[in-house]
Image (cartoon, helix red, strand yellow):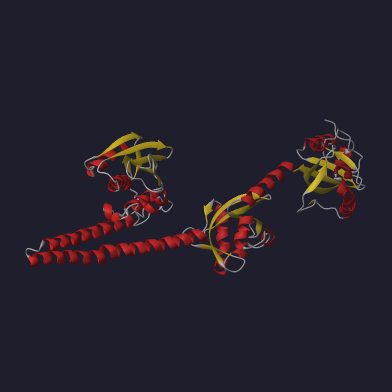
Amino acid sequence: MNAPHGAPAALAADSGPAPELLARAFNAAPSGFVLVDRAGRIVAANDELLRMFAYPSEALVGQPLEMLLPAAVRDRHVPLREAFFERPSPRAMGAGRVLYARRADGHEFPVEIGLNPVPRPDGEPLVLASVVDISERLALEWAFRGVFDAAPVGMLIIDDGGHIAMANRVLCDALGYGPALLVGQPMDRLLPERYRPRHGALMASYRQTGEARMMGQGRDLTALHADGSELEVEIGLRRVRWQRQTMTLAAITDISGRKRLERELRQANANLEEFTYVASHDLRSPLRGIADLVDWIEDDLSDPPQPVRHNLGRIRQRILRMERLMDDLLSYARAGRAATELSTIDIGALVPSVLELQPLPLGFEVALAIDSQPFQGTRTPLETVLRNLLSNAIKHHDRDSGRLRVEVRQDDVYCVIDVVDDGPGVPEAAHERIFKLFQTASAAGERGGSGIGLALTKRLVEVHGGRIELQSPLADQRGACFRVHWPRFPRRASED
């Protein structure tokens, strides 16, 4: 391949390589190269630069360098070029700024330029400029910046000197800063004072390993807000390449809301446990004492009149009802935690098993339509749910006979169970209320219910990752369908 005019003579010294070899290396380089004299004229340009700027061979030699620059910067470039020739030294051009060049068709594109003085054999100074088209790299960088800034969690990029190279909008909003206020600042600015002395050593240790991991596992981490308050956070770390350096990407999630809910939930559970202790011990004992007193009164009276026996019987019924109520409350409290003992559940066998342990009253019948394969799950909670729903349908029926229907099918990750009855139905206004404690659609005293069964059912379903819905009335303004979505695949909580 022939070299552009002037290239061998400009590049070769008397004792150096052959001009032909230098010319071939010059043209074979993967980056664009242009050789410029003190007057700003192009002495030589290699094939890659000609391709990059879409000029034909020999079209640039002897032309002013400024023809490769956008029109808006040509006049400003001349004094800068002259200043470089006054103090020539190898360096990058326009460090920290995006430079643009101009193709033959007028299209402007971003470039990276390196300058290196090259004296000719006659001592006349030249400058060799390397030109790299960074359009693709810049497009990827801008795309990354867009994704980085739009990320739903706070994100930081920190250089190995401990300074913030980038911060996204979510993080700045969470900590009360504008993005421009954080870039270039030491990372310690976002740390409470007590963390700072050992933070540098911890980060240095992390840089040696460099694996992606969560920061401060097992400890409560906080970040410092601009107003001096502290924010509970989770931090994930990963080493990344950015701006031609290896840096640390930190994903910072504000978990203050989650922590507050966790504290409230722990307090609610503690209150519930305390209540169940009182119900099972402090209340049950007086009830047994009352029952004993009723027995003693009846024994003392020997042969009490009929009205007295009737009233004593009513007292015993109320004591039994209170004991059942306390048992139901204890069951509700214990349903707050998911069972973890897994077994194979065959719904086709489970429903008949429930009906065998809890036979239907005379006049009631149940039809089964089961289309579901066995799956792994927690049998006892699901069995309790089915028993409660069938019992509820019978207990609140307004007739001496009725038809129930249990339909089971698979729906993606759930086993869908419909328990349908032909009872009086549930008014739409009561759909939400009946799933709360001590609430029923009808008077609980009339049906013998405590108002806890459906609340317990809902609690069991949801704590095991499912959901329950009610459709009522169905036809002729009667009937109800309780639909349970029960997971067919075991769910694993993070604390497991």
Point out residue 88 in the picture as x, y percentages from the top left corner. 85, 53
Identify the residue shown where x is 83% and y is 39%: 103
Point out residue 303 in the picture as x, y percentages from the top left corner. 7, 63
**Labels in figure, total:** 0
Q: In the rendered image, which quarter contains the N terminus?
A: top right
Residue 13 can be seen in this image: no
Residue 293, picture quadrant? bottom left
Point out residue 48 in the picture as x, y percentages from the top left corner. 79, 36
Identify the residue shown where x is 46% and y is 60%: 261
Residue 170, picture quadrant? bottom right
Identify the residue shown where x is 33% and y is 35%: 370
Residue 403, picture quadrant? top left
Relative side of 114 to 481, left or right: right
- The foreground one among 441 and 487 is 441
Residue at the top extreme?
A: 1
Image height of 207 relative to 37, above or below: below
Residue 279 can be seen in this image: yes
- The foreground one among 433 and 263 is 433
Point out residue 440 in the picture as x, y percentages from the top left corner. 34, 53
Image height of 37 relative to 196, above or below: above
Relative side of 246 to 349, left or right: right
Residue at the left extreme?
A: 302
Image height of 1 relative to 227, above or below: above
- The foreground one among 55 and 290 is 290
Relative side of 169 to 454, left or right: right
